[in-house]
Image (cartoon, helix red, strand yellow):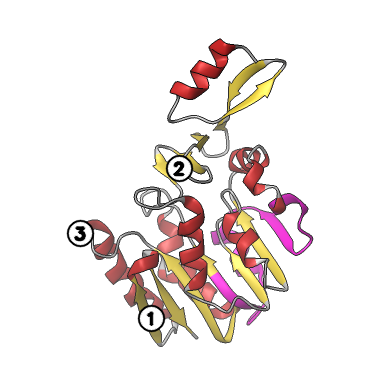
Amino acid sequence: LSWLNIEKIKKSHANCFVIEDESIKSIQVFSEHTNRVCSLLPTKGVPSMLIAGFTMHRIIDTDPMQDTLRKVATIAPIIGTVLDTATGLGYTAIEAARTAQHVVTIELDPGAQQIASLNPWSQELFHNPKIEQVMGDAFEVVPTFADAYFDRIIHDPPVLSLAGELYSGVFYQQLFRILKRGGRLFHYIGDLNSKSSGTVSKGVVRRLQEAGFTRVVRKSEAYGVVAYK
């Protein structure tokens, strides 16, 4: 690896690289499935993923792994069969699999899966026998699961503007149906104290309650809510 390439890596704050034939290549994919660019984004901790300009984790005053741990902790203990509705880099599925018996994780975009395959911190996603990857649209995949199949659900969708259907009452009804009685759902929304996410959260809470979740609790530290069945 040349010093020129080392300097290029050092100066880049928005790209991760892979070495191929003594040259470097940015870890970036244009997804023909979504017509969006996916890339691996360096942070002060483990990398995040950047899709259409949106980071898939909180990276200000925290890092993607701490962000993941906060989300998962809201519905501890993580037991039984767990659904992760949006794989991304797989950090959530990997963390859940530490204590769960089985984790099902759904990924819409083959491009995102390709990025994950190049991320050293995502390798358990492909090698842990407790993790089952499902490729497809969560809005279409979730209705195929049996009633009361999951003990825990982690719903960490893209922002509302990219995946509005995953914030719909129809989808929440399906999440309620596949969750066991006594089960818990974490729904990531964003900073509940911000104007935009605060508005979104009110609609989310109302639709979750209409779907059947009798108790919905704000979890500001994890930027989301927990719904109980």
> Residue 219, image x and y in percent?
36, 72
Q: Which residue is mark 1?
A: 216
> Residue 137, image x and y in percent?
58, 54
Q: Mark 2 Cα within 10 Å, few/some/many (few <14, many 20+)?
A: few
Residue at 68% of width from left, 73% of height from top?
100
Is there a contact, CB below 8 Å, between mark 2 and mark 3?
A: no
Helix, strand or loop status at disc 2 = loop
| In the depicted structure, whether residue 32 falls above or below residue 127 | above
Q: Amino acid at mark 3?
A: Lys
- Residue closer to the observer: 100 or 212: 100
Q: Quote the CA–CA distance across marks 3 and 1.
A: 20 Å
Could you say which quadrant of the image residue 198 lies in? bottom left
Per the rendered image, the range of residues in magenta is 125-153
Q: Which residue is mark 3?
A: 195
Could you say which quadrant of the image residue 194 lies in? bottom left
> Residue 188, image x and y in percent?
42, 63
Could you say which quadrant of the image residue 144 lies in? bottom right
- Give whichever of discs 3 and 1 has the lower sequence position: 3
